[in-house]
Amino acid sequence: MIVFDASTLILLAKMDLLDVFVSNFRGGISIPELIKDEVCIQGREETPLLTRLIEDKKIHVSKVKADKAVRKIMNDFHIDAGEAEAIILALHEKASLVATDDRNAIRACKVLKLDFTTAVAILIRAFEKNLIDKAEALIKMQKLESVARYNRAIIEEARKLIEGGE
């Protein structure tokens, strides 16, 4: 199972990669209720896709009932409630992966020994698994670069991996 926070869900939706990921991921995909509320806001361009994936039960929404643990994670790592709930859900469900693009949530995953992934890593993996071709991967990388706040070195390294791979 993979647990997503809002940032990675939104980034994948914005670069038109979320449908590809959901269709090809073999495990379950889960988000806390709070993340659903964050990503399904009326008027946002990605809301219809996210709402459909939730309604079609391709993304499972879970209630997180660990208020003290959520507050502790928020305070310890200086992250928002959504990221903290995603981490708590991943711990409770023994998820294999947390999908987050939040720097402090990544730090929390490292400390808590939770494997994590990012939108860039998912894009590279989709290319490596031939789910998208090189031209499409580069277009999606360009979209990601325009909407995300990645370190320039991360974007350049990802671009090199895509351009060098076949």
Image (cartoon, rainbow, N blue to C red):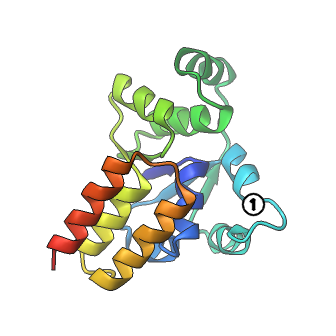
- Looking at the rendered structure, the kind of residue marked 1 is Cys
In this rendering, would 90 be left or right of 124? right
Determine whether the residue tagged by mark 1 lies in a helix, strand or loop: loop
Considering every residue shown, the one lying at the far right of the view is 42
Q: Residue 75 is drawn in which quadrant?
A: top right
Q: Position of residue 44 (x, y in %)?
A: 76, 66
In this rendering, would 119 be left or right of 51? left
**Is residue 58 visible in the rendered structure shown here?**
no
Residue drawn at point x = 61 percent, y = 50 percent: 6
**Is residue 112 visible in the rendered structure shown here?**
yes
Q: Residue 89, relative to residue 163: is it above or below?
A: above
Q: Residue 128, relative to residue 76: is it above or below?
A: below
Q: Residue 57 is drawn in which quadrant?
A: bottom right
- Residue sitting nearer the eye, 91 or 82: 82
Q: Position of residue 8 (x, y in %)?
A: 52, 54
Q: Residue 109, relative to residue 163: is it above or below?
A: above
Q: Position of residue 53 (x, y in %)?
A: 62, 71
- Residue sitting nearer the eye, 57 or 98: 98
Q: Position of residue 125 (x, y in %)?
A: 28, 65
- Classify mark 1: residues with Cα within 10 Å, few (<14), some (14-19) or many (20+): some
Residue drawn at point x = 35 percent, y = 46 percent: 96
- Residue sitting nearer the eye, 1 or 140: 140
Residue drawn at point x = 64 percent, y = 54 percent: 61
Which residue does the numbered mark 1 point to in the structure image? Answer: 40
Question: How many discs appear?
Answer: 1
Residue drawn at point x = 44 percent, y = 27 percent: 108
In this rendering, would 27 be left or right of 83? left
Tell me the quarter of the image containing the C terminus.
bottom left
